Image (cartoon, grey):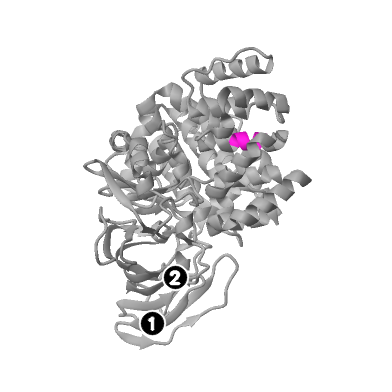
């Protein structure tokens, strides 16, 4: 997933003041408990799901049945599952109707569904319907799509939102296989995180199979006017017809990416790797749904300059989907590994100088996040404490960038060859299994450090995993290309000509990020006249430019900024831009007007974030 957002988070003083060594010992000593599932999958194993659902665009509802194959290992008398906003119509156990109950709603967790079972119970079938306000679901009217003729639906189940459209054991450490039958209006196509059709059928009924076990957060569904175009024998792109050719051009190197990733850390184990480009309201950069990455159209820049995001989602096929964080408090084991892997893919394909730009931009993001959270904040530990909190509170650049830089430090300390061998064995040994932080650190010591205390001390693991901020030994990469950008920025500020030929998106981002803030209106005009930032089609550059425009009160950019905010739903862009507007009375008025006008174009997850920000 690519959507880390720095936010000011609360934490307990007791947790913050706990000595790192004590915390590590506790992690090792106790049976790791997932705080964010109400299920009892540790007692009753949910092994396979047969899903049979229908999609109703008129009522914004999904309804049908979820049939769970279970194994009652502990001979418990009740199966507990996660739900949130679901209407449970009836339940059968091995074909016999039973009386179920729903507990009261708990903050952040939803309602626990209780189903009486026996020791020998084998199958539980739940007939249910979703709420029209299900957090995982975004229902788009035809006017909100590119084609303007057909509606669109997509899901976003991470972190704990699968329970808003499927009654399930909704924890990252709980895996199951699934089959599905999905009925949609004729003329539309349905896709899932499974084996998919490559063209529409006449019946509106689609069948899916996922043979590899996955956690609930990787359950995904999309329905709309969707076409497909192959890239090579095992990769391809799905998109609305109006976007298909552009997306196919942008992702032409995806097949090569898969081969490159395999050369680093072993075989791709999921069959096909396809990419679905969603409508602009998608709140994330991408989501690593197995076999079918969901991604934002904001990476379609026309020059393939933003496809490192696809490398990130592809890397999740190893770090995250194959070996999964046991709980959301271990989120860095998904995202930190994936950022590191992503940059290794990009280095292999584009060269070290190119990857170094990604590392430096990531370090800048890490610095900004630590500054926002506070350098001593408990939320800047890699091992999170999400007690009584929404797991989304932990989805910041700490997990992504601090985690990746930890692995970069391990590489520089032990040597790349040694680390690569370790990671390859790590993925092979723990394939389709889960991992918690203390367990990983033990594996790291045994198989990478091999008890070498000098190496361990040099890395200083506790400072990274159980300590705040950016450790003093955080590695920094060479800045050959950005040094040239820094020189050109200096020339601009001195009134001299600027040489920008051959710059990628990353050079432009660094050029603008390090500008004084705010620039004068005259300086903004000068930049805009030379480089046409207000009209840019590059969403990364556009968002940064519009933030600068708000800060400088550069009004010529405001019309295009509103157009940008009317279509783009990615939280990475929305949050900092609306935050900048909220800093002044004039900006607040503009933010409230624009948000009230376009918020229905944003996913419920994005709306939740912005509702708090804009009040």
N-terminal of the two: label 1 or label 2? 2
Q: Which residues are magenta?
A: 544-548
Vertical comparison of 197 with 46: above or below: above
Instruction: State the SS at label 1.
Output: strand
Distance, label 1 to label 2, CA atoms, is 26 Å
Left or right of residue 515: residue 144: left
Q: Residue furthest front?
A: 149
Q: Residue furthest top?
A: 496
Vertical comparison of 349 with 383: above or below: above
Vertical comparison of 545 with 239: above or below: above
Any part of residue 441 in sight = no
Whole-percent x, y for residue 533 in the image = 57, 30
Whole-percent x, y for residue 450 in the image = 41, 36
Q: Residues within 10 Å of mark 2 (few under 14, many from 20)?
A: few
Whole-percent x, y for residue 400 in the image = 51, 41
Left or right of residue 565: residue 343: left
Which residue was labeled with disc 1? 91
Say the numbered circle drawn on residue 58: 2
Q: Quadrant of residue 300?
A: top left
Residue 545 forms part of the magenta stretch: yes
> Which residue is painted at 69% across and 36% down in the image?
555
Any part of residue 212 in sight = yes
Most foreground residue, 614 or 380: 614
Q: Residue furthest left?
A: 233
> Which residue is painted at 25% across and 67% down in the image?
203
Q: Quadrant of the C terminus?
A: bottom right
Most foreground residue, 175 or 482: 482
Is the stretch drawn in magenta largely helix, strand or loop?
Answer: helix
Q: Quadrant of residue 166?
A: bottom left
Most foreground residue, 564 or 439: 564
Which mark's residue is nearer the viewer, 1 or 2?
2
């Amino acid at each position: 997933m690519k959507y880390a957002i720095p936010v000011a988070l609360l934490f307990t003083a007791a947790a913050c003041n706990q000595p790192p060594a004590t915390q590590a010992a506790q992690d090792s000593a106790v049976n790791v408990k997932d705080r964010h599932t109400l299920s009892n999958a540790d007692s009753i194993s949910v092994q396979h799901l047969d899903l049979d659902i229908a999609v109703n665009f008129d009522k914004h509802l999904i309804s049908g049945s979820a049939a769970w194959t279970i194994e009652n290992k502990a001979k418990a008398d009740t199966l507990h599952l996660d739900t949130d906003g679901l209407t449970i119509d009836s339940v059968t156990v091995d074909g016999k109707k039973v009386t179920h109950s729903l507990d009261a709603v708990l903050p952040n967790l939803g309602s626990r569904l209780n189903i009486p079972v026996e020791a020998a119970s084998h199958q539980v079938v739940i007939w249910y319907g979703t709420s029209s306000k299900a957090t995982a679901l975004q229902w788009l009217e035809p006017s909100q799509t590119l084609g303007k003729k057909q509606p669109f639906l997509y899901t976003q189940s991470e972190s704990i939102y699968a329970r808003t459209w499927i009654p399930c054991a909704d924890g990252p450490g709980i895996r199951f296989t699934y089959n599905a039958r999905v009925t949609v209006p004729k003329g539309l196509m349905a896709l899932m995180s499974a084996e998919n059709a490559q063209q529409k059928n006449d019946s509106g009924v689609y069948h899916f199979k996922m043979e590899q076990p996955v956690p609930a957060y990787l359950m995904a569904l999309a329905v709309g006017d969707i076409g497909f175009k192959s890239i090579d024998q095992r990769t391809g792109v799905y998109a609305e017809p109006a976007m298909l050719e552009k997306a196919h051009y942008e992702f032409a190197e995806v097949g090569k990416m898969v081969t490159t990733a395999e050369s680093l850390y072993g075989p791709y184990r999921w069959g096909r790797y396809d990419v679905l480009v969603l409508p602009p309201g998608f709140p994330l950069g991408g989501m690593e749904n197995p076999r079918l990455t969901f991604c934002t159209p904001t990476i379609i820049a026309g020059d393939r300059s933003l496809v490192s995001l696809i490398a990130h989602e592809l890397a999740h096929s190893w770090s995250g989907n194959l070996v999964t964080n046991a709980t959301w408090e271990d989120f860095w084991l998904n995202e930190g590994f994936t950022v590191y892997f992503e940059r290794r893919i990009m280095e292999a394909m584009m060269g070290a100088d190119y990857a170094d730009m990604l590392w430096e931009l990531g370090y800048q993001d890490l610095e900004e996040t630590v500054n926002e959270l506070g350098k001593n904040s408990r939320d800047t530990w890699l091992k999170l404490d999400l007690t009584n909190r929404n797991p989304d509170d932990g989805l910041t650049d700490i997990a992504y960038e601090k985690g990746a830089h930890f692995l970069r430090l391990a590489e520089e300390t032990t040597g790349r060859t040694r680390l690569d061998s370790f990671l390859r064995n790590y993925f092979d040994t723990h394939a389709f299994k889960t991992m918690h932080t203390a367990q990983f650190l033990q594996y790291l010591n045994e198989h990478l450090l091999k008890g070498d205390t000098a190496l361990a001390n040099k890395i200083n693991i506790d400072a990274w995993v159980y300590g705040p901020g950016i450790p003093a030994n955080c590695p920094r990469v060479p800045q050959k290309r950005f040094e040239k950008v820094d020189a050109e920025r200096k020339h601009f500020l001195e009134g001299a000509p600027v040489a920008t030929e051959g710059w990628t998106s990353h050079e432009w981002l660094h050029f603008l990020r390090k500008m004084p803030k705010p620039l004068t209106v005259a300086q903004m005009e000068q930049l805009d006249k030379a480089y046409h930032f207000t009209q840019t089609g590059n969403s990364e550059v556009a968002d940064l430019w519009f933030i600068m425009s708000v800060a400088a009160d550069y009004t010529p950019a405001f019309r295009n900024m509103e157009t940008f905010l009317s279509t783009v739903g990615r939280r990475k862009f929305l949050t900092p831009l609306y935050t900048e507007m909220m800093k002044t009375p004039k900006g607040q008025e503009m933010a409230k007007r624009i948000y009230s006008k376009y918020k229905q174009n944003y996913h419920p997850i994005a709306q939740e974030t912005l509702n708090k920000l804009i009040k």
